[in-house]
Image (spheres, rainbow, N blue to C red):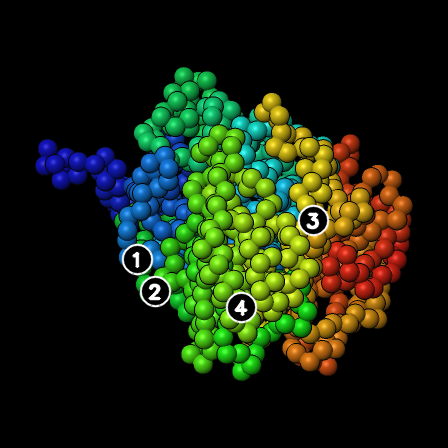
Amino acid sequence: MMIAQLLPNSSIWMLALTSVALRAQGARQPDYLDETKSTDERVADLLPRLTVEEKVAMVHAKSSFAVEGVPRLGIPELWMDDGPMGVREEVGQHTGGGFDSLNREDDFATAMPATIGLAATFNTDLAGAYGSAIGQEAKQRHKNIMLGPSLNIQRTPLCGRNFEYLGEDPFLTSRIAVHYILGEQAQGVASCAKHLAANNQEEQRDSISVEMDVRTLREIYLFSFRACVQEAGVLTVMGAYNRFRGQHCCENDFLLNKVLKDQWGFKGLVMSDWGGVHNTELAALNGMDLEMGTLPPYSKNYLATPFLDGLQSGRFPMSALDEKVRRHLYVMVKLNMIHDPAATPAGSETNGVLSTQAHQDIARRVAEESIVLLKNEELLPLNPANLKTVAVIGANATAKFARGGGSANIKAPHEITALEGISNRIGGAVKIIYAPGYNPPAGRGRHDRGDTAPPAADADANLIADAVAAAKSADVVIYVGGLNHEGGYDTEGSDRPDLKLPGGQDDLLETIVKANPKTAVVLMGGGAVEMGSWLSRAPALLYAWYPGMEGGHALARVLFGDVNPSGKLPCTFPKRLADSPAHALNAYPGANGTVTYAEGLLVGYRWYDTKEIEPLFPFGYGLSYTRFKYSDLKLKPGRNPAAPGVTLEFKIANSGDREGAEAAQIYVQPLTPSVPRPLKELKAFAKVSLRPGRSRKVSVRLNRDAFAFYDADKKGWVAEKGDFNILVGSSSRDIALRATYRLPQTVFDPD
């Protein structure tokens, strides 16, 4: 009776018995606690020590972001957090419209630039630093799994989550994501590659069924997931909300079992998106390892009591449960989470400030390298010494973006707006006049309004008049506009209604450029917008994405020449929405619950180049304040016929008068393919920094994968004997060097 009163909790009682038994044995540590044993050996020893009830508790959520542990065996709770762009704040119960904030003071985190901006850097080293900073902060916050990066390909420029994806190209996405994951997981935190697969629109995302051919699936939409599994060793993968070929992705035997686990050899944990499971039997048998959600009681989750009942009745085999828990334990052992139940686990304390200066510096560097100079007719960089008055116009000049966009939002200790960054840079010697000029969109957007578009913000005559007056009185105008995370623009759960600049910005820009021809336009957002006739009159245009907590400083450093812009577009900007492949073929948003990817392989620049459609700005495009010259391309084929490939060598010279960086892009063009292929595809890139007058030899290796396509009949990758053009340039449309390489023999690699 006395012991029961002291230890009313059964798990504590079992913990005490276990500890006593181990001490009584004078026994050696069990194998699962022996760090000299392999991960598989430790998991194999631990798994049978769990009861059926304990195992079931580990395969479904216990709260919005946590999973039950087993204290008697030293298995802690598993905690996760949203994290493509930083560690989300601590939140309370989900209320239907979002999570309640707990208003804590210890959960501020570094707000990184949007990951579409990270892709625009074309810098894998920065991607590693980006992931590393998030991993370090997650570790301090005791988060075991960070829900990112997001790998879905930009199929339509309207997708509401394009800002947290990595663009339209699977190769670029894979390179940035692999280095992000390597940086993050090196901190002892698991990354979660999401959303598998084909979550390429938010419109009808919970129900839409995606149909596409096998080559398109493998070459475009699964390509980066495969790289993250096989190259980066990502420890967790999240299923998508949508259906694939009629079956929900979180219950999809083909995607989760056959492809991810069997073909790719993934040993980690597959979790659902929140509320992405719909059926106990399908989740139990088709590869889902952990059901997450937001709505209690969690005992009613599909993989909770209904799963336990099915196991006890014999409806489901115990091996199905063991497989799920084995993967759960595999991740925990890899993260060094399992501990002696009689000891206090290491690392249970929190030390230091979460968002350090070093992390904020990484955020600023990413923002600086992400900004894309799209046009410059000798206006930029600006020289404060030549200015007396600067007009800063546009609602985004004072906007903050870190806490918007859905699950990607971050509570930052500060966020430098564009206006603050410009003011801090030029000081008090130059007068700054600010005018918002337009009303930005507001509200939740069409996700909450059925299929109707959000109401457009009305133009305000007084705001326009103030903006024009400011423009006329200034030596130069810096216009900061574009999109935001409100009103159905760039937010989870809602696709954009169109490609127009909201709030009447096209008309406003026409007026401003007429009032002051020295206008530098800065647009923020998650991707392409259509641009009015003002573009031909504006002498300078920058695209700054959502630049994170140090974005204002980064923008100012680019505008005033402290940093030379080097960003490149990771997505094509079409002249009009109808030019985009999914829209040209009337293959978005789908009908009768199904969307068919009629464009197949021709996503993004593959479509524009193959169909000879001129974009507004092409994939890979971005200018500089200096000039780069490409020369001396040489091909050096490998000597091993069994592993064919070629090494490229070429020279890049900085022929201008400013230090700068260039992202050289290498495309491969098959000349005599036996199957339909895109005109050319990105297969390598290299970012090079050069001082004025300097040059550097760049060496890039193209292995046989660079020449391969997926053969659905053979179920593998075929690098086909024949001739290929190797194209080197500064964008998909600006090819400076070319040479022909002959692949000496056909090589097949099973997937």
Q: Position of residue 179 (x, y in %)?
A: 58, 57
Is 1 left, or right, of 46 in this rendering?
left
Seen at 39% across and 28% down, the residue is: 301
Name the foreground residue: 525 vs 708: 525
Q: Which quarter of the picture shows residue 140?
A: bottom left
The numbered mark, 1 or 3, whose residue comes first in the sequence reads: 1
Q: Which residue is mark 1?
A: 106
- Residue positioned 60% across, 57% down in the render: 510
Q: Please, what is the three-letter code of the amino acid marked with disc 2?
A: Val
Q: Nearer the viewer, mark 4 or mark 2?
A: 4
- The amino acid type of the residue labelled 3 equals Lys
* Residue with the mark numbered 2: 353
User: In the rendered structure, which disc, 4 or 2, sits on the residue that comes first in sequence?
Assistant: 2
> Is the residue under label 3 in contact with that under label 2 (CB below 8 Å)?
no
Of the numbered discs 2 and 1, the one sitting upstream in the chain is 1
**Residue displayed at 51% across by 71% down:** 473
Which residue corresponds to mark 4?
472
User: Residue 243 in the image: x percent, y percent?
Assistant: 57, 29
Q: Give the distance between the C-alpha atoms of the residues marked 2 and 3, in whole angstroms.
A: 46 Å
The answer to which of marks 2 and 3 sits earlier in the sequence is 2
Locate residue 110: give its quadrant: bottom left
Q: CA distance from mark 4 to mark 3?
A: 30 Å
Q: Regarding mark 3 in the picture, which secondary structure is present there? A: loop
Query: Of the residues shown, which amino acid type is indicated by label 4?
Result: Lys
Please give the residue where the numbered disc 3 appears in the rendered image: 575
The outermost residue toward the left is 2
Rendered image quadrant of residue 180? bottom right
Q: Say which element carries label 2.
A: loop
